[in-house]
Every structure is written in structure tokens, then in C-alpha cells.
Amino acid sequence: QVQLVESGGGLVQAGGSLRLSCSGTGNYFNVLIMGWYRQAPGQERELVAEISSWRSKNYADSVKDRFTISRDIAKNIIYLQMDNVKPEDTAVYYCNARRGDWGPGTGYWGQGTQVTVSS
């Protein structure tokens, strides 16, 4: 079992920056891929970014060149650096952890952290 706890959400003005953190505890041995998803009101949860244990990264087109995902494997923490944020980035952001043989959007989830971008 893996437990994930997010932090760092809040209110930020458009064009500003925010950094989210996700700390993981529990049986981490088989967790290979960690990522951030988000869900805006009335919309489906969507992938924002993922990073593997060998630090291969994957980003949604909407956040490329603005967001950066990183991982401290020794500390079991991942980060999402959000720069030049836009009002459409407003959502609840969820940390995710999954094994490599599990599909995207499956696995373990944090409780979510709200990010609100004002225009």
C-alpha cells in the first residue's frame, strides 16, 4: 500500500508561479511511475505530467514549457513547478503513483490540493 500527501496548492495570479509537492510513504518498491493529474469542476480528471523512476517525463500539451515535474527518489517526493500559470489551470491537483504494468489513471491517489488562478 502507498500513501500520498500533496501540499503547496493555493491562490495565485495569472502569470505567477506555484510549486506542488507530493510525499509518498508505504511500500514503494514496485512504484515506478508518479505523476500529477487535475480535475476542474464539471470536467474529467486529466493527466498533467508523469515521471518514471529513471526520470523519463511526459507532459500534457496544455502545460508543456510551463510546468516541470521532478522527483527525489531517495525522499519519495515529487514536485510540480508551475510557471506562467493561466486561469484554465484552476483545478484540484492529485498526486498519483502506479506500477509500470498498470495503465495511466490507475494506482494510488492523494487527497488532492486546490489550485486557483485568478485573472
Image: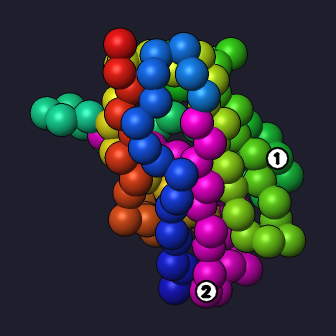
User: Does residue 22 lie above or below 69 as drawn?
Assistant: below
Q: Name the residue located 51 percent from the left edge and 34 percent from the top edge.
A: 48
Q: Amino acid type of disc 1?
A: Arg
For label 2, the residue is: 26
- Number of disc labels: 2
Question: For the magenta stretch, what is the residue range?
Answer: 18-39
Residue 36 within the magenta-colored segment of the rendering: yes
Instruction: Please indicate whether residue 97 sits to the left or right of residue 87 in the image.
Output: right
Residue 28 within the magenta-colored segment of the rendering: yes
Way the structure is coloured: rainbow
Q: Residues within 10 Å of mark 2 (few under 14, many from 20)?
A: few
Q: Are marks 1 and 2 in contact (CB under 8 Å)?
A: no
Q: Is residue 59 visible?
A: no
User: Does residue 44 lie above or below 27 as drawn?
Assistant: above
User: Which image quarter is the C terminus in?
Assistant: top left
**Spatial CA span between label 1 and label 2:** 21 Å
User: Residue 50 location, x and y as percent?
Assistant: 62, 43
Q: Amino acid type of disc 2?
A: Gly
For label 1, the residue is: 55
User: Residue 87 location, x and y as percent?
Assistant: 36, 18
Q: Name the residue located 63 percent from the left edge and 23 percent from the top edge.
A: 83
Q: Secondary structure at mark 1?
A: loop
